[in-house]
Amino acid sequence: MSDTREPLPLATSAQVRAEVRLALKGGTWRVVGVVSLLTAGAAAGLVTPAALGALVDVVSESQGAERIWWIAAAIAVGALAAAVFDGFGQVGATRLVERVLASTRERMVARGLALPRAALEKAGAGDLVSRAGDDVAVVAEAAPVVVPAVTSSAFTIAMTIVGMAALDWRYAVAAVLLVAPVHWRTLRWHRRNAPHVYEAERAAMAQRAHLLLASLRGIETVHAFGRSRPHGAGIARASWEVTKWAVRARTVINGFFARLNFAEFLGMGSILVVGFWLVREGQGTVGAATTAMLFFLRLFDPINRLMYVVDDLQSALASMRRIVGVIRAEQYTPADRPEPASDTAAEVQGLRFAYTPGHPVLDDVDLRIAPGETVALVGSSGAGKSTLAAVVAGVLEPESGAASAPVRTALVTQEVHVFDGTLRENLDLVRPEATDADLEAALRRVGAESLLALPEGLDTAIGGGGLELTPAQAQTLALARVVLLDPPLAVLDEATAEAGSADSAALDRAASAALEGRAGLLVAHRLDQAAKADRIVVMERGRIVEEGAHADLAAADGPYAQAWGLWTRGRE
C-alpha cells in the first residue's frame, strides 16, 4: 500500500533563530549579564594554570617560601572566583534556555490544537504526536545541557588562547594552526552527515507511532478480521527502520569522537615540541612551557565538551526544526472566512472540495441555511454529507467556491472526546465563566439527568482517570457544551449515531433541544430523525439532487421518497 501521507513541514534555520529571538524578547539585559559572568569566569579560570607554571620557576630558581604562599593564595582566589562567576553564569544561561523552551512548547501546543483536521489526517496521527512527544523531549533534555556548555566552553576557549598568546605567540600558533583545522574539518564532517540522519530517525519514529496508534485505535476491528499479523508486521518494519537509522547515528558519533582524540594527540605533541625548542634556545622557561601545557590541557574539557555537545546540538536542532515547523506552518492557516449576511446563518456557493486532486468529493454545491432553520443532510454512504458539514463548520477549506459561516460555530461528531477531569471541567471548557447553575441548566436542557445524578455531581471525575461514561452520556455531554457555547450555528455530524437503539430517541430529543433557538445542520443517519428538520437536503456523489420539506419530498417520486418508503416499510 502506497504511503500518501503529507508530513507537517520542517522549519528553516532562519525560522528557528527567529523563534528563539521571539522567546528571548525583553530579556536583553539578562543575556548581557550571562555573557559578562561567563567571561569573568573564563578569565578567572586562567589564574590556576598560570600560577602553577610560575610555581615551577619559583621552585627551580629557589625564590623562597613566601613567593610560594602568594602563588597558593592566587590559586585559591582564582579557583573560587572562577567557580562563582561560572556557576552564576550557567544558572543564568539555563534560565534563559528554560524560558525559550517554555515559550516554544506553549506556542507549538497552541498551534497544534489550531491545525485543521484535514492537515492532521494527511500528516498522520503519529507526526504531531511524535513532535509533541519525542521531539519536545529531545530538546527539553538537550537544551539545558547544551546551551550552558556551549556558552561556557566558548568563553573558556577564547580566554585560554589569549592567555597562551600572552605567554608566547608561538604556543598559540602551535595550538590554533594545528588543532583548529582538525576540529573545523570534524565539525564540517559532522554537519554534513549528522542532520539528515537525525531527521530521518525522527521521521521513522513518527511513522512507527502513526502505525502503532492506528492499530491501537482500531484494535477491535484488527482482531475481528484477523489482521493482527499484517499490522504487527507493518509495525515491525517501521521499528526496524528506526533501528537502522539509530545504528547510522551511532556510526556518525563514533567517527566524530575518533577525530576528536586525534586532535588532542596532535595538540599535546605540538605544545611539547614548541616548549622544548623555546627552552633550549633560551627564549622561554620551563615554567612558561608548563603553563602553556596546562593551558592546553585546560582546553581539553571545554573543547571536548563543546564538540561532544555538538552531537546533542545537531539532534536538538533537528527536533527544533520539526517543532518550529508546526508553529510556522503558514500554509495551514485558513483565510479569514466572511461572515454571512444578516438573513443567513451559513452559505456555500459553487463549492468544490477534493481530498485527492482530481477526485472531487463535493462538486458545485450550493446551500443556504436561514437563521433558526434546521437543515438535515441525507444520502448514501460516501455522498459527501460529512465533508459538506466539515466545510460549513470551518474544519475544511473549499478547493473552490465560497463559504461563509459565523466565527462561533459548534461542531459535534459521533467521535466525542471526554477529557480526564471532573464533569465541571468537561463542561466549562467552552465557557469558563459559567456558574454551576448554568452547567446544571445545560445538562437538564439536553435531558442529561444521569450525569446530574452522578455520585459527586459536577465534581465527579470522568474520563480515563475516573468514571467511564456510556456512549449516550458522552453524546449528551457534547450537546450540553453546545448549549453552553450558545453559537448561532451548530453542525451535528451523526452526533447520535454511536448510541444504541435504546438511547436513540432520547438523543434525538437532546439534539433537538441543543439546536433550539439556533440554526442547525444535521447529518442524519436515520430518516425519522431527518423528517423532523425544517428542510431536508438529499446528496448523491457530491451533489445536491433534491431538497425540500419532509412532506413534499415524501410525496414526490424522487430518491428521498424511495428511501422513505424502504425505511417505513422495514419498520412496519
Image (cartoon, rainbow, N blue to C red):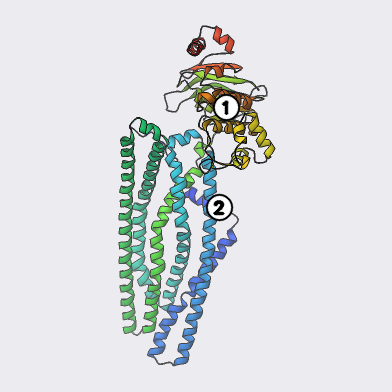
Quarter of the rendering containing residue 207: top left
- The answer to whether residue 434 is left or right of residue 75 is right
Q: Is residue 486 visible?
A: no
Number of numbered labels in the structure image? 2
Which kind of residue does numbered mark 2 sit on? Answer: Ala
Examine the rendered structure and indicate whether residue 382 appears above or below residue 261.
above
Q: Is residue 454 visible?
A: yes
- The answer to whether residue 322 is left or right of residue 34 is left
Q: Residue at x 49, y 43 (%)?
A: 326
Q: Secondary structure at mark 1?
A: strand
Q: Earlier in the sequence, mark 2 or mark 1?
A: 2
Q: Nearer the viewer, residue 355 or 55?
A: 355
Distance from disc 2 to disc 1, alpha carbons, whole Å, reads 38 Å
Label 1 sits on residue = 491
Q: Secondary structure at mark 2?
A: helix
Q: The N terminus lies in which quarter of the figure?
A: top left
Q: Position of residue 546 (x, y in %)?
A: 53, 13
Q: Position of residue 165 (x, y in %)?
A: 42, 74
Label 2 sits on residue = 23
Q: Residue at x 65, y 41 (%)?
A: 432
* Label 2 close to label 1 by CB (< 8 Å): no
Which kind of residue does numbered mark 1 sit on? Answer: Val
Q: Residue at x 36, y 30 (%)?
A: 224
Q: Position of residue 502 (x, y in %)?
A: 53, 24
Q: Nearer the viewer, mark 2 or mark 1?
A: 1
Q: Nearer the viewer, residue 39 or 506?
A: 506
Q: Residue at x 50, y 41 (%)?
A: 329
Q: Nearer the viewer, residue 464 or 267?
A: 464
